[in-house]
Amino acid sequence: MRQKSQTRQTGAAKAIKDIRRATRKQYSAEEKIRIVLDGLRGEETIAELCRREGIAQSIYYKWSKEFLEAGHRHMKYHHLTMASASYKQVNILSRQSTLQLNSNLNQLTWVIYMSAVRSATSVPIL
């Protein structure tokens, strides 16, 4: 029975791989966003963009997915925040309206009361 051959890296190959990994370009968030936005503009193909930037297409699509998901999360959070703010504003406005209505009702009641008092105490002119 044949045993599976296992490929073992030689010391030199492992050292080269480690050096490549250590010297790999690290992209900042701003660079990633710029690259993704360039791709979304559609002025050139994704393949051309990736070649120009020196990245694999899979990396571009990974960044694009992360970018769009972050935007979705932000919009969802913003919508929830706005909804709760609107709810709070409606409650505040409702309370203010109720207070204003009560105040107007009290004033109207006072005017009617005073009119009744005046008419009851006034002497009719003949």
Image: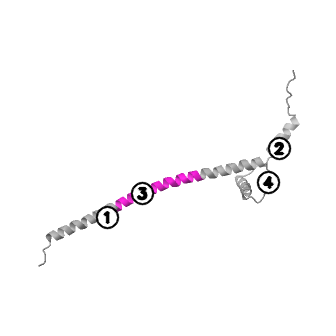
Q: Earlier in the sequence, mark 4 or mark 1?
A: 4
Q: Assign a secondary structure to mark 4.
A: helix
Q: Amino acid at mark 4?
A: Glu
Q: Earlier in the sequence, mark 2 or mark 4?
A: 2
Query: Which quarter of the figure has residue 2?
Result: top right
What residue sits 83% from the left and 42% below the top? Answer: 19
Residue underneath mark 2: 20
Q: Earlier in the sequence, mark 4 or mark 3?
A: 4
Q: Amino acid at mark 1?
A: Asn
* Overall secondary structure of the magenta section: helix
Residue underneath mark 1: 104
Q: Assign a secondary structure to mark 3.
A: helix
Residue 72 included in the magenta stretch of the image: no
Q: Assign a secondary structure to mark 1.
A: helix
Residue underneath mark 3: 92
What residue sits 42% from the left and 57% below the top? Answer: 92
Q: Which residues are magenta?
A: 75-100
Query: In the picture shown, does residue 97 fall above or below 50?
Result: below
Looking at the picture, tell me which residue is in the foreground, 126 or 28: 126
User: In the figure, is residue 126 to the left or right of 111?
Assistant: left
In x, y percent, where is residue 54? Answer: 81, 51
